[in-house]
Amino acid sequence: MINLFSAQIESMSIHRVGNKSRNESLFISEEPHELSDELKPLIKEYFLKSFRDKEENYYHFVHDNDLEFHQLFSLTTDIFNNPSESHSISKKITRLLFEESKHQHIKGGEVYVVYFENMLLDNEKVSAVGIFKSELKHDFLQFEEKQNNLDLILQQGVYLNKLDKGALIFNTEKENGYKILSVDSNKYDTKYWLEQFLQVDFFEDENFYTKKYLKFCENFAKDVVLPAEDKQQEVLFMNKAMNHFASNDNFNEQNFLKDVLENPALEPEFQNYKTEKAPKYKVEDLSDFPISNTAVTAARKKIKSVINLDTNVQIKMDFVKGDSAEKFIEKGWDEDRQMFYYLVYFNKEEKS
């Protein structure tokens, strides 16, 4: 889990890359940029806001042969080893990005290479290297007094509320290619940023395993439990799955299945589905792993716990108080109306 509140910008370099395939230029600044006290909090917020608002999906540098041949890994390591050399190393990083700016859709823009101190990652203080890029320019108005009139001037600039591209490389797990967070608001050129420039893959830790397994369970509930049972059982399955993950520190698949499968006949279906869908969800070898509470909390917010009925009625179940769907809702069949019904028990209506 990250905390960016106490992060401090120790140095920042600004350069500009164009699109190489369109013969656009590369501009390298001779000196690092000295941020004023007024600008420093605004720029820090611009760089880091998107990472606070984003789910923590970590990456790490990867190379087919050895990490020592990964250029960006080596350059980042050089900054961590010699922070005073950050600006000269930032020039090499920017040239590396320029070399990958070949596709016609890639936009030019400003590149910021920033060295941070006092990042908090899993309650441990670490340094970090940030590589950010601003691509889109937005119109804004400036006003100028001219004699007795106020003149209107149209200009273009960077919108500080939204970062176009960014990567935070944390000085931890070096032997595994560091832990990295990435932001990319322009999805049309994701390969350029993630695969060609950063050259990263998912960092497979407890956070990764927990997210992947819960996502796999969510789709098993939709594709297998729902057709075999009904919507209530689909929701109940995910309800129990979430409660199992929330109440255990370590995951064991056999214990999980005993705990969450209401219908034992679905266990072979579960194993078949896992074999069939394993490559998609990366769960083929997952049967025991430590559980990430952060990932469970994030998953709770995303999973839909609503039964939508064709009578324009919705029944929403609470995943925090997980036994509500099982204890206080009954499904039945009304012979007179020839319709299904849900019977809901309660003591009083809560004030909204």
Image: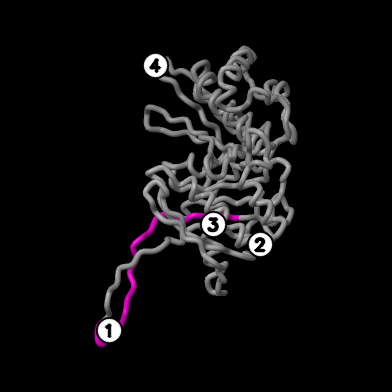
Would you say 245 lies left or right of 269 here?
A: right
| Mark toward the viewer: 4 or 3 | 3
The image quadrant that residue 337 belongs to is top left
> Counting residues from the N terminus, which is met first, the one under dot 3 or under dot 1?
3
Amino acid type, callout 2: Glu
- Compare residues 151 and 306 and report the one nearer the observer: 151
Asked if residue 271 is positioned above or below residue 126 in the image, the reply reads above
Residue behind mark 4: 338
Amino acid type, callout 1: Lys
State yes or no: discs 4 and 2 in contact (Cβ < 8 Å).
Answer: no
Residue 81 image position (x, y, % from top left): 72, 56
Q: CA distance from mark 3 to mark 2?
A: 27 Å
Kindly report the secondary structure that dominates the magenta region of the rendered protein.
Answer: strand
Determine the residue positioned at 58% across, 39% down.
300
Residue 218 image position (x, y, % from top left): 55, 28
Determine the residue positioned at 39% across, 63% down.
157
Residue behind mark 3: 49
